[in-house]
Amino acid sequence: MYSKKIKIGFCNALSSVIPSYAVMQMQNLQVLKVAYCSSLTEVFETQVLKHNNGGSNTNTDGGNSGTNTTISRLENINVPQLSNLKKLVISSCYRLQFVFTYRTLESLKQLEELTIEFVKQ
C-alpha cells in the first residue's frame, strides 16, 4: 500500500516532488505538504514526450537529427490523477513555477484545503 500522507521539507536539490514515473502510484495520496525546498520548480513533474518522426525527411529541428522538437500540447503530458487528495500545502519554495496543470486540477474532486504561501521568485 502506498502512502496517504507525504511531508517533505528542506530538500534543496529537489526540482519536483512527484516524478512523472511515480504519478500512477499516488492515487491514494490524501495529504501533501512541501516546505523550504529552494530548488523546487514544479510539484508534479510534467513529462513532455519527444518522438522520432519515423525516418521521414520532414522534421521540426532544422534538419539536424530527424527527431521532432519537444511537443508541448497538453494532451501529450502525463497528467496526475489525484482524486483522493484532500490537502495540499506548499510553503517557502521560492522558485516554484507550476503546481499542477488544468487537467490535473480537474481530478482534484476531494480537495478541501489548498495553501500556497511564500513562493515568490
Image (cartoon, grey):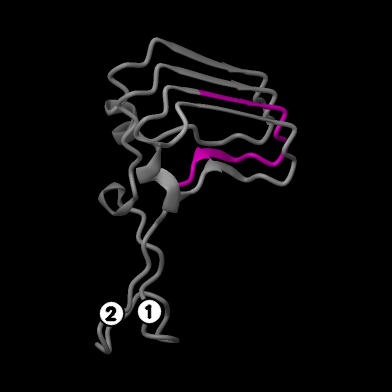
Q: Looking at the rendering, which quadrant does residue 91 occupy?
A: top right
Instruction: Tell me if 93 is positioned left or right of 78 in this view.
Output: right
Q: Mark on residue 85?
A: none
For the C terminus, which image quadrant?
A: top right
Q: Which residue is drawn at 37% across and 30% down?
A: 28
Q: Which mark is residue 53?
A: 2
The magenta span reads: 32-45
Question: Does the magenta run of residues contain 90?
Answer: no
The part of the image, by quadrant, that contains residue 38 is top right
Three-letter residue code for mark 2? Asn
Q: What element carries label 1?
A: loop
Pick the quarter of the image with the N terminus: top left
* Residue 96 on image: x %, y %: 60, 34
Task: Residue at the far front: name it.
Answer: 1
Element at label 2: loop
Q: What residue is rendered at 30% in x and 52% in y? A: 73
Q: Are marks 2 and 1 in contact (CB under 8 Å)?
A: yes
User: Is 82 left, or right, of 54 in this rendering?
Assistant: right
Decide which of tag 2 and tag 1 comes sooner along the chain: 2
- Quick one: label 1, few (<14), some, or many (20+) residues within 10 Å? some
**Residue 39 is inside the magenta segment:** yes
Q: Where is residue 115 in the image (x, y as percent from the top left)?
A: 53, 14
User: For the residue carrying disc 2, how many other residues have a C-alpha within 10 Å: few (<14), some (14-19), or many (20+)?
Assistant: some
The alpha-carbon separation of the residues under discs 2 and 1 comes to 6 Å
For label 1, the residue is 67
Q: What amino acid is at disc 1?
A: Thr
